[in-house]
Image: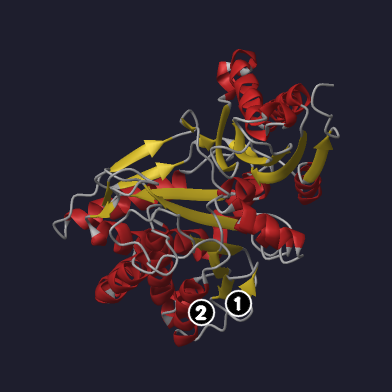
Amino acid sequence: MDRLEQKIIDCIEQHREEIIAAGRDIFTHAEMGYKEYRTAQIVADKLRQLGIEPQTGLAVTGVKGYLKPQGNGPVVALIGELDALPIPAHPDVNPETGASHCCGHNAQIAGLLGAAIALTDPEIVQALDGNVAFMAAPAEEFVDTEFKVGLIQNGTIRYCGGKSELIRIGAFDDIDIAVGHHITPNIPGYLLANGTTNGFVNKVVTFRGKSAHAAGSPHTGVDALNAAMLALHAIDLQRETFRDEDSVRIHSFMPRAGTAINVIAEETCVESSVRAKNIRAMQDASRKYDRCIRAGAIGLGCTAEIVTVPGYLPTVPLDDPSLLTGVLQDLSAEEKTRGRDYPVSFHNRDFHSGGSTDFGEVSSIMPLYQFNTGGYTGELHNSNVRVTDEQLAYVETAKIFALTAYRLLKDGAAAAKKTVAEFTPELTREEYFRFMEENNRTEIYPEPQQPGK
């Protein structure tokens, strides 16, 4: 650690209680995607307090502020996510929204604000040969799909994912390198997160049939629920057609399935995620999914409206994450001198997660450094999630964010320039938008038949 790195750590330690208070406050005031107005206001207010005038309302609720009003050299984005999950069973659920931070995004925002506190020190600013963008991104969790599709239909957004929408409106156009964070429950320290994840497209399918008395005259109806069940069974039978190495996952639920037990279902809605490790496999699984939906509709004589919504791309790991590895290892050694044991573990390129993140979008077009911290117990996306080490969850996150930005931009931004020079994007921005638009469509299969025909 050089002298300024030590200064960054000491500054964050001096503001420890403030950072923890922010993490606690956001944890108990969780908000759903594209509705994170209170959380976004917290970020904007803190940036203004630090002398940074932020852009607000980006992709509905996003916030972006620059460390320097103007700067030459590479721009590093430190990114935190604003949204939470609809898990009302959590004891700290926000009663007004029904949302809970069982995803750990509150730790990202607390860490982002803590990093901003340290990096705005005038001596640190002077040492950086480039700029830092503090970004709070909306709507990472791909939930509440009908609400988001409604925003698309009224022209508020084009894509459901927050970072996808930020890319669309140009908020990433001046960013050279991104740094992201996630929580991993039940680990004792830091994690280098340089593995891969699945990408996905989402489907919102509405089967429409004809209602009838379910006991007295079911033969006069067309059962939309049965059409959905037939389609889902056909999807199950597709599993043997997927290659193991493509890590295909298709999972569904029914937000609506008829109206009453004695009424043949006139309308049934199925929402699904179609995931895979690479774009080719995603597209293949998506086509097979659509065929199965058509089969269910045709077999029962329903119509099926298939709304395909672009989700997230697979995460692309860095070839050389050694800068972040060094940050984690050096900080771990430093924390031992303070009586804290935070070991470093690694997810390298050969580690794959079947889940997805919209950091996949970012990693497809620019270099992405990702790290995880512990400090939580339970299981992500579960009501048993608890914050058990606020130092690790919130304060250490701030240190890693700040130290990573500093090491990238010090000494003429040599490390940042090397990172950019060695990176080959998976997609150009033009190719990215072409992919998104090809998977942003609505199709209807066929007109309903009369019963008995």
- Give neighbour class at mark 2: few <14, some 14-19, many 20+ (Cα, 10 Å): many
Q: Residue at x 48, y 43 (%)?
A: 321
Query: Can the viewer see residue 176?
Result: no
Instruction: Quadrant for the C terminus, please.
Output: top right
Amino acid at dot 2: Ala
Q: Residue at x 57, y 40 (%)?
A: 315
Pick the front one: 403 or 274? 274
Amino acid at dot 1: Thr
- Give the vertical position of 162 relative to 437 (above or below): below
- Give the vertical position of 452 relative to 222 (above or below): above
Ranked by sequence position, the earlier of labels 2 and 1 is 2
Instruction: Quadrant for the N terminus, please.
Output: bottom left
The CA span between labels 2 and 1 is: 7 Å
Picture coordinates of residue 19, whole percent (x, y)? 32, 72
Pick the front one: 393 or 83? 83
Dividing the picture into quarters, in which one does residue 155 lie? bottom right
Do the CB atoms of the residues marked 2 and 1 lie less than 8 Å apart? yes
Q: Disc 1 marks which residue?
A: 56
What colour scheme does the image use? secondary structure
- Give the vertical position of 214 relative to 240 (above or below): below
- Give the vertical position of 216 relative to 374 (above or below): above
Pick the front one: 97 or 174? 97
**Dot 2: what SS?**
helix
**Dot 1: what SS?**
strand
Q: Disc 2 marks which residue?
A: 44
